[in-house]
Amino acid sequence: MNFVESRPFLRIPPFPGASPANLVGESVASDRLRVSQAEEWLDEVRRLRVGGDYWAKQPELPVQPYTVVTLNKSDEVFEQIDGSQYILHWSDSPTDSQVDSSKYRRISGSCDPWHVLMGAEKLVVHADDELALIASIIGIPVTCLGAGRFSALTSGRAVDTVNAFCEAVGAANYSNPFSGEPMGIGEAIQLSGFWRNLIDSNRDISAAFGFAFWKQPTVAPLLWGGHGNVSFNSNVVDARPTGAVAVWKSRTPAKVVNALDHRAAKVIEVEDGFIRSSGLGSDCVPPLSIAVDRLGVHFDPGQPSELEELLQNGDFAPEIVDRARELRELIVVSDVSKYGVGSSSIQRRDSTRAHMLVPGQVEDDRAVLCGGGPVKGNLDLLMRAREQNPGAYIIYKPHPDVEAGHRVGAVADADCLEYADEVVRDQPISSLIDLCDELQVNSSLAGFEALLRAKPVTTHGVPFYAGWGLTRDLGPVPERRTAKRSLDELVAAVLLLYPRYLDPVTGLPCPPEVLVRRIAEGAAVRQNEGVVQLRRLHGRWKKRLSGLIQ
């Protein structure tokens, strides 16, 4: 084991595809850790379990109490350990000789130190090894051998732990990896905890099915379990998982889904997030946000989902609600929507009439098939909107994927105009929402985006945002949804707590605020341009062919 630790105590996990980055920069620190502050940050580090290689593998541990030894076997070391104890011998080197005694177990390679030490009674370690500090933070007795920066931790005194922590953590200058700006110690700890929580949630995922090759580079960091690579598979022969399976169900062959069901595999559904990218998924622009749900899928009201559970039973602290409000305001002022950013000033068509926006959807999309309620397609939605609002000026906007020629749901203009006053194609959805007085939706995400902009929404289907007291609901909302939520509680669940986001610049998982700013700045481009152009050409060809057939 290399006892000379040149790396900072708080560091960035090596997410697949991410640009090399460091939390410790050359800038002047925005704050320095004083001894009087150390206990607060120590508690946070202990609670979040960050520091060291916290993303590394988590080996099976002995049931009985054990001592961890990180030095090569030698009389000098083992003389200090009671012979009745079980010893876990930890070495970075896979070439160290195997310890034969039944009282010894050897593990090698990088391991999550918090996992390995949590059940330990004692640690024997070189005095320069950061494991000494982690054990001391946890409260495990430490024996430090040799000379080094953590020698004093052998004493077991709390003041020595505080001093060592101040030296290891408080002496660094932290930089935000997304902005390059100076970052405080508390922010560095919280960001490390954010990454740890994501990695821990993925540790049981053994395989992933249904992910197109152009999605995999951006999805992999968000499904990474801390070591190895995400195992993307495509055929039924590979459907023999040893743990949970991440599935993009609409793109997974039925025979694979059936094989997973037959093997009673734990299936985790993955779908696009609500702030997705700068460009269409149907054009093969990869997602920069995904939703990962172990209960179901958020757009299917026929079963509970993690999102529904959050909204029904979640306890939203004031600070998370405040953050949700700020995020909502950032999205609105930046004119960011699911597929990018854009705004324009649109004049009202008739000053004497209320303006209604009816957004079309992809008619064979799972979200529509599951959550569309009684609505039978886009033309039926338009008819229902007109029945509800006979005197309104109704604007119909076809779904971008349908307009691009990739998906089902096209309605001839002549048919649309029997119920709508106008069909608008090229205007950004955010501008149309700003123009209109109300939205009439089936289960479209445009309804949620309208709520962000404080516009009234009537739902004819059952979208995830229906039933919480924020919309007028005409569809069959599940009786399970009894909680009433404020707008910012809805935003907290839907945008802060539920999805996962990837920064297209660094390749690191990030908070949503980072991705919103990247999209607003035009920096959210992470795609295979050749594939995107080919897909767009294919869509235009299909659309022209469809027109010829009609």
Image (cartoon, helix red, strand yellow):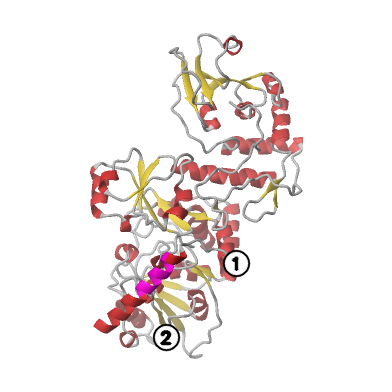
140 vs 307, nearest the viewer? 140
Circle on res. 392? 2
Residue 230 visible here: yes
For residue 392, above or below residue 155: below
Residue 495 percent coordinates (x, y): 50, 58
What's the distance in space between the residues labelled 1 and 2, CA to CA?
36 Å
Residue under pointer 1: 521
- Answer left or right for 281 relative to 96: left
Indicate the quadrant containing the C terminus: top left, top right, bottom left or bottom right.
bottom left
Q: What SS does tag 2 mark?
A: loop
Residue 381 visible here: no
Q: Residue at x 31, y 84 (%)?
A: 412
Dot 1 surroundings within 10 Å: few (below 14), some, or many (20 or more)?
A: few
Hey, what amino acid is under mark 1?
Glu
Q: Residue at x 54, y 74 (%)?
A: 342
Q: Residue at x 43, y 27 (%)?
A: 60
Indicate the quadrant containing the N terminus: top left, top right, bottom left or bottom right.
top right
Of badges 1 and 2, the one in the foreground is 1
Q: What SS does tag 1 mark?
A: helix
Q: Residue at x 48, y 90 (%)?
A: 350
Residue 311 percent coordinates (x, y): 45, 55
**Sequence-wise, which precedes: disc 1 or disc 2?**
2
332 drawn magenta: no
Residue 265 percent coordinates (x, y): 30, 42
For residue 251, above or below residue 407: above
Q: Give the magenta-colored segment's residue range.
A: 531-539
Hey, what amino acid is under mark 2?
Ala
For residue 204, what is the image quadrant? top left
